Image (spheres, rainbow, N blue to C red):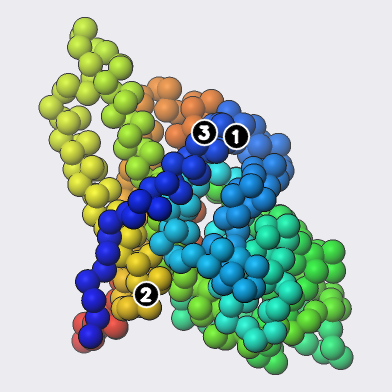
């Protein structure tokens, strides 16, 4: 019998939020993120080190006896909310969630999982960012003990120290980054770049079976991505309200106009609903209760709300919102990219309909 999900934040989760937000306020300012996105090297290694070495956040999902913090998906969701609010250019979702979840499903992960938990090694699961949980995924060819082929749309591959590569023999192989060629691809979100990974006779160590590892990783990714989208949407709403209180027209705050009040009230309601959906998915992943349904609900709802919140922020900031110097474009690009990450809202609605036995005739 399933229990009612707990959507409230615990005292420990609120303390974690405050600590992460303080760190990001000090070390992840919008001008720096914009400058990095222009530089061609978006990943902030110093920020990653602070999050992992100083706070131990890379190992939240890893049991204590394997070098991690032994926390749950609820704590990870809180971290992702704050990273979303800052559009932080760090490979947290891809390494501390996706690659880590894949290794937790593998019997031979051993020392590699401990390395990822420390944050000193960044791991990336070499599947396309667009793949939904349960979808078929491309594999490379294993021949004479070496791996051959290429995989496209791999997020944060340029930051990886090790890649987890699925092969045609059903195995998942750990491949050191210097054994592959990473070719950047055009990405809308410059803070989370994607790339093509080319393997030409690369050596790899089998860590487990690919299918259950990839399935587990993508399910957790989709469920926890909703928390990042919540952070994006919440920042967009909060900053827009703040700006409209300060911006004056006809000698009165723009936020006082009734039409804008209605738009913001509707957006607030959608963000509140998104928070419930994201918290529900995080709690389901932590408890193992109704996971597939909760993840599908969260992702069916999250993407449209995050995109709309960022679009409203851009429009209601007026001319300043259209400038490169204002950070709102970072949020819109991340929201747009997230809307196709780990399955579109439509794909998750279809999955939910199947789970509920509501297929169209």
Whether residue 195 is visible: no
Asked if residue 213 lies left or right of residue 178, the reply is: left
Q: For the residue labelled by badge 1, is the local secondary structure a helix, a strand or a loop?
A: helix
- Name the mark on residue 25: 3
Specify few, some or many for label 1: CA neighbours under 10 Å numbering under 14, 14-19, or 20 or more.
some
Mark number, residue 260: none
Instruction: Name the residue rendered at 32%, 54% in the picture.
Output: 9
Q: Is residue 8 above or below residue 198?
A: above
Residue on which disc 2 sits: 287
Quadrant housing the N terminus: bottom left
Task: Choose between 169 and 32: the one closer to the eye.
Answer: 32
How far, Cα to Cα, is label 2 from label 3? 32 Å
**Residue 334 placement, left or right of 275:** right
Q: Residue at x 63, y 83 (%)?
A: 106
**Distance in Å between CA atoms under marks 3 and 1:** 6 Å
Residue 162, image quadrant: bottom right
Cβ–Cβ below 8 Å for labels 3 and 1?
Answer: yes
């Amino acid at each position: 019998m399933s229990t009612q999900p707990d959507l409230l934040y615990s005292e420990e989760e609120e303390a974690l939020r405050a600590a992460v937000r303080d760190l990001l306020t000090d070390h992840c300012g919008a001008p720096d993120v914009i400058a990095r996105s222009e530089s061609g090297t978006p990943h902030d290694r110093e920020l990653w080190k602070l999050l992992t070495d100083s706070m131990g956040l890379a190992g939240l999902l890893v049991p204590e006896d394997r070098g991690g913090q032994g926390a749950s998906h609820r704590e990870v969701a809180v971290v992702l909310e704050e990273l979303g609010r800052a559009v932080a250019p760090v490979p947290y979702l891809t390494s501390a969630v996706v690659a880590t979840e894949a290794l937790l499903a593998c019997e031979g992960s051993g020392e590699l999982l401990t390395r990822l938990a420390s944050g000193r090694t960044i791991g990336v699961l070499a599947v396309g960012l667009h793949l939904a949980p349960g979808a078929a995924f491309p594999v490379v060819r294993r021949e004479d003990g070496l791996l051959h082929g290429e995989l496209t749309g791999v997020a944060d591959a340029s930051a990886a120290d090790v890649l987890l590569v699925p092969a045609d023999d059903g195995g998942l192989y750990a491949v050191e980054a210097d054994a592959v060629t990473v070719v950047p691809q055009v990405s809308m979100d410059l803070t989370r770049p994607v790339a093509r990974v080319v393997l030409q006779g690369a050596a790899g160590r089998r860590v487990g079976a690919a299918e259950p590892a990839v399935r587990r990783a993508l399910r957790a990714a989709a469920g926890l991505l909703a928390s990042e989208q919540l952070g994006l949407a919440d920042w967009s709403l909060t900053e827009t309200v703040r700006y409209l209180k300060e911006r004056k027209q006809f000698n009165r705050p723009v936020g006082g106009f009734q039409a804008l009040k209605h738009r913001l009230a509707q957006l607030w309601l959608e963000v509140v609903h998104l928070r419930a959906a994201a918290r529900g998915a995080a709690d389901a992943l932590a408890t193992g209760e109704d996971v597939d349904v909760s993840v599908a609900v969260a992702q069916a709802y999250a993407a449209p709300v995050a995109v709309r919140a960022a679009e409203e922020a851009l429009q209601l900031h007026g001319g300043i919102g259209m400038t490169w110097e204002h950070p709102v474009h970072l949020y819109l690009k991340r929201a747009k990219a997230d809307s196709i990450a780990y399955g579109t809202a439509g794909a998750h609605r279809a999955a939910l309909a199947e789970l509920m036995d509501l297929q169209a005739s």
